[in-house]
Image: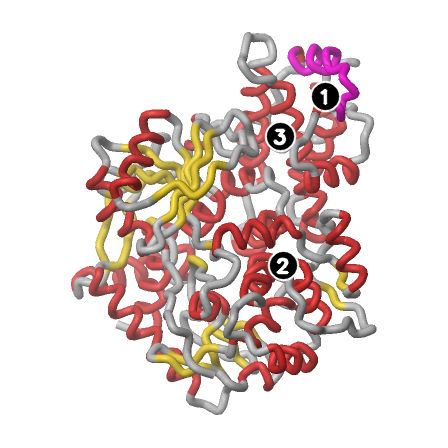
Amino acid sequence: MAAPPEHLRAKTVADLTRWLEREVGPRLRKETEAIAHGGTALTLLGIKDSTKDVDLAFRSREAFDGFVSALGSLGFSRAADFRANPREVFHRLQNPASIVDVVDLRFPTWNNWRLSKAVLRRAVILPLSRVRLVRPDRDAVFLFKTYPLRETDVDDLRTILAVDPPDEARVLELFEDQDAIHRSELSVATAHEPLFNILELRVRFAASLQLLGPSWRRKIPRIARHAGQRLADLHLGHSLAKLIRILRTADFVSWDEVLSGDFEPLRARLAKEPSRRAGPKGRKIDGRELQRRRPSP
Amino acid sequence: MKHEIALGLLSTATYGTHTTTELVRASGHSPTTVVRYLNELEDRGWMERIPAERPGVGRPPILRRPTDAGLAYLREAELGWFRKVSGNGVRILWGPVRALAFWGVPFMGRPDIFADRPIEAGPFPVLVERSLMFYEDAVEAEDGRFPALESLVAWAAKSGNPRHVGAAAILLRDPRLRVGRLVERSERMRTRNRVGFLAALSGGNLGFRPSPSKEKMLDTTVPVEPETEALARRWRVDNPISATLVKDMERLYGRSP
């Protein structure tokens, strides 16, 4: 067989950081923070390979627009706008002539994850010209990977467990931090429904742990137990298997329908629920302590 | 300076962004050895430091990364290693990261190799593929040998890695694919049903018929669309990947390279 007409080279992290530093950075008007997500974050951590698209998130509209504009000046054009989450802006930009040819940009969150102080505490910021590339730590990436429930994300979770297992206490601390952020919004006026964010967070966390399979769950028993408990606390009246099927196969998850319309009691209960922690300095919380902290029905 | 240790550090720093502490951890060598080698690599102009930052408290970490000269040296050294390990009667081809890129589905990551038996391959992770037919009709390029397109598709369909399975679905629509050879490879590598299922899932028809024995695609079950479930039953494939994943991959890489 003849050799392929075009020899494409596998891309490396060095290609990505050089591209950001030499091509994107000089085209930005000011220093811009870009947070690596998804497969890109895993590849930056050296944990596994990823598809060719580069995933970046932005915390401010100004940073997002500045980055889009810099890519535009490099010949990138918008390929598609996905809106899996109505509150997130998601642009895919492409330029087949560039070494990094597909870039996915999201603002202000990525799959609903809030980039809180706790999430970024162990991140590393790489100054690459005017790009400040934020590489989250392994535990934050592990938690982020529990959201999408795609085959590839479940596979990534397994790879993290095999290559560099997460710190269970920190993953639980980060999960509770996100949960507390959403619950704190239940009692204030918001444009979105925080209850749905809590449902997405807890159900997807438990679903990912379920999809990992028993032998992998045994490697992170505290996380697995906690995920199951946080889901059970919701009293949704549906099996996890059914919820996984809905989340995996529905184009849009209607939580109104899942909750049969009446979600005020759940809303009120969650608004009063005290924050849980993974224990001071990562101390293990046993079942009895969890029981004691749970509010009475 | 031991070539293997230097190459290992250069390789780790190229395929990830690592602080000095992380490089020590990843290399498995003592901090003294790693720092000595990093300094030596820096003196030769192959590695440089970037002062990084942390949002939290703590000393700012130093990141180590290859210079352009370091990258050029690494690429030469990798090719040298590839030729060296190919020379002992072992069948060696570039692994999925480079091979999928070669055939039009590039990934970002560390290069690996296929070998017909377990071997010590320096900086490369090794994927053992014992079927000798897999190594037939390999394509010789300037930078090493790559599996034939049909071999790669047959392998990817049984790899168990959802991204590689998705890549196989894309490559199945490649006009360079020789269906006769693919049928033969799929039979011999016992992946006929998986290849047939993937072709059907991406809207193609290879003229295959399913064989009676069941084949498993992924390690565990992940719920898929009812139509995909029915298709997998028809092709006698357990734990199939979803049509959604194939569509996502097609959206990213195009329907055919």
Do callouts 3 and 1 mark residues in contact (Cβ within 8 Å)? no
Span shown in magenta: A256-271
Rendered-image quadrant of the C terminus of chain A: top right
Mark nearer the N terminus (3 vs 1): 3
Label 3: chain letter:
A
Classify B64 as above or below B213. Answer: above
Q: Which mark is residue A256?
A: 1
Q: How many marks?
A: 3
Residue A118 showing in the rendered view: no
Does A225 sit left or right of A90 as displayed?
Answer: right
- 3D distance between C-alphas at marks 3 and 1: 16 Å
Q: Which residue is mark 2?
A: B202
Magenta region, mostly helix, strand or loop? Answer: helix
Task: Verify whether residue A269 appears in magenta.
Answer: yes
Q: Which mark is residue A201?
A: 3
Q: Nearer the viewer, mark 1 or mark 2?
A: 2
Q: Position of residue A172 (x, y in %)?
A: 59, 33
Does A260 sit left or right of A81 as displayed?
Answer: right
Classify B55 as above or below A17. Answer: above
